[in-house]
Amino acid sequence: MQTARKKIIIDTDTASDDAVALVMALREPTLQVLAITTVAGNVPLELATKNACLSVTYAGGARPPIYPGADRPLCRPLRCAEGIHGKDGMGDQSCFRAPEVEAERTHAVDAILRLVREGEGDIEIVTLGPLTNLALAILQEPETMKRVPRITAMGGAAFYGNTSPTAEFNFWVDAEAADIVCRSGIPLTIVTGEAGLEAGVLGPEKLELLEAASERGWFCVTCNDTMRQNSIRSRGYPQIGLPDPIALAALTRPELITGSFDAHVRVETQGSDLTYGMMVCDRRPPEYGAVSKHEGPRQPFQAKVVYEMDPEGFFQYLYELVK
Ligand code: RIB
Ligand code: CA
């Protein structure tokens, strides 16, 4: 008997690594992508939405509705990542076909709340960008959002940041939103920047294999050309990193997870440039009593933090979906 597909909503600041994750998700037979919601992050919202439409076009799989969401973080100015992904977020290429799908007019937060409210309590959410849309949905209808069984979020730094010494980009763009999600009571799987930076790296050989696999494979490599050119300039050879596809793989191929821990996770919102957006993992066992009367109350662990995945297993998975 065929097992039911897992229903998910994907929230994304679609730039080049998000695009690969979207292609994978739309071709993964065990997933039913009910909606794609876009958020400002890597690039401004309009570009993230256009890039999501382009990724759906090239995926050659299901074509779920795309809902544009927040165009800025909750409290701070938007800070993008064009240096990594290109000004348009997709490697600044002129060779792609025009998108064959258009975004909806409904706001992402309204779409998320409607789907979760009308669903059977079985709709998980995968986030690939800043958590602004999720935070707005939680603030607007906290009880509705408690119907979400799990959020798998690409974000956070377990040991070292990629955007500041302590913060990963998605949590650094909107730390207030990330902390609201951590405090929501929704179970979390947080797939950190380190997992992507290590297991999600494609060097010259893997890039060649992927590019030659299919038009989808060519799209996945070409939209990451800014990263590839940056690597050629700095390392002397092509290489890209795919943190968002790693986060998706943590959901659909948990056997590829080789390093994780459970914790109560919060995100620093009052910090300096050194610590704003830092993920704080409290691993003190909540069931043990406080060591000192000066300690604050211990919180139950609400997050599984994934910091390491199998790189070869990940590439085989990516290649199988894209070829
Ligand atoms: O830190 C990596 C994350 O930030 C990825 O989601 C990338 O797309 C950017 O959003
Ligand atoms: Ca992203």
Image (cartoon, rainbow, N blue to C red):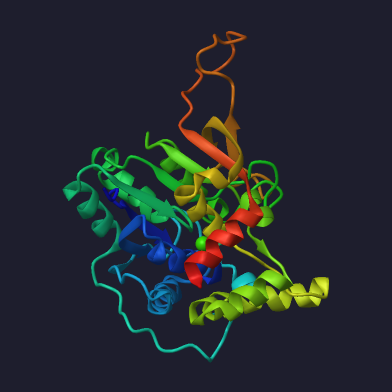
Spot occupied by residue 25 in the image (x, y as percentages of width and height): 42, 62
Q: Position of residue 311 (x, y in %)?
A: 65, 54
Q: Is residue 292 left or right of residue 151?
A: right
To which quarter of the image does residue 307 belong?
Answer: top right
Judge from the rendering whether residue 237 lies leftward or rightward of residue 251; answer left or right: right
Q: Measured along the vertical axis of the image, is residue 296 above or below residue 99? A: above
Image position, residue 5 (x, y; %): 30, 52
Q: Residue at x 40, y 36 (%)?
A: 187
Residue at image position (32%, 44%) is: 138
**x, y percent for residue 133:** 37, 55
Check the image and report above or below for 107 versus 30: below
Quarter location, residue 305: top right
Q: Nearer the viewer, residue 111 or 313?
A: 313
- Looking at the picture, does residue 212 appear above or below residue 40? below
Residue lying at 67% horizontally and 56% vertically, measured from the top left: 197
* Viewer can see residue 86: no
